[in-house]
Amino acid sequence: MAPKTRCSVELRLVSMFGPGKDLNQTELPTIRQIIQYGIHLRQKAQIEDESSRKYLNNQLFSDIRDGVVKLWNKANYKFVTPIIISDQRITERIELIWNKANQYSHNSYSKKLSDKNKKYKEYTETLDLLFDLAACRDCPIQLCEEWEGCSGCTQEAHITCNCPKQKRLPSIELKFMRSMRQQRPPGNNIFKMFKSANNIVFVKG
């Protein structure tokens, strides 16, 4: 991609998603923060190399993945594969997020949409949700006061989980993950939106 074209793409991204920012080291990132981190890395590459031609998307996606995984590892050293999804799947999801951001920020496409458009609204509603790397994502987590038969315990939360044992969330992190996911609608799959020709289709991810 030519420098001028890349610059115009970044301006569109900034206009829709906000300025480029490094990852906040005190919290797990949202979808919007993933996009902003990508913008930040692009801008950083441009400062270091004006042409920025060597900083291809594959490298960008890998760098975003490494930054995000590092934060999850920082939250708990047990947050590694298979408790979190594989590097390949993380990279694929980041690529999806980036491509979708480019699609929706493109002027010619945005003009066809509005806040009343169902698909556009569904997309924008995902932006401030957790970029969830956990392999166990949809098993319900309940606090002790919500869990029948528990009057309070050291882990402070419980989960009904049918996942393989090696993929289950650490008990000590259940309350934390419940908190991080509290705005996420049950069963909602953030990564179900893919582009098919000029349409958005929904698939199970």
Image: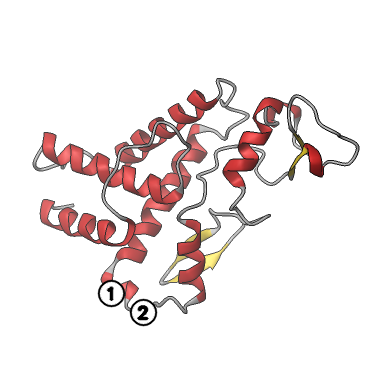
Whether residue 150 sits left or right of residue 19 in the image: it is right
Residue 54 showing in the rendered view: no
Please name the amino acid that badge 2 sits on. Lys
| Horizontal and vertical percent position of residue 166 | 70, 26
Q: Tell me which residue sits at (58%, 27%) in the image.
A: 81
Look at mark 2 in the image and give the residue it sits on. Answer: 112
Look at mark 1 in the image and give the residue it sits on. Answer: 108
Image height check: is 125 above or below 93? below
Whether residue 69 sits left or right of residue 37 in the image: it is right
Q: Tell me which residue sits at (73%, 31%) in the image.
A: 156
| Horizontal and vertical percent position of residue 202 | 56, 64
Please name the amino acid that badge 1 sits on. Ser
| Horizontal and vertical percent position of residue 83 | 63, 30
Q: Tell me which residue sits at (55%, 38%) in the image.
A: 133
The secondary structure type at the circle numbered 2 is loop
Q: Residue furthest left?
A: 50
| Horizontal and vertical percent position of residue 174 | 68, 34
- In the rendered structure, are the residues bearing label 2 and label 1 in contact, judged by CB atoms less than 8 Å apart? yes
Image quadrant assignment for residue 15: bottom left
Whether residue 43 sits left or right of residue 29 in the image: it is left
Gap in angstroms between the C-alphas marked 2 and 1 = 7 Å
Q: Residues within 10 Å of mark 2 (few under 14, many from 20)?
A: few
The secondary structure type at the circle numbered 1 is helix
Image quadrant assignment for residue 102: bottom left
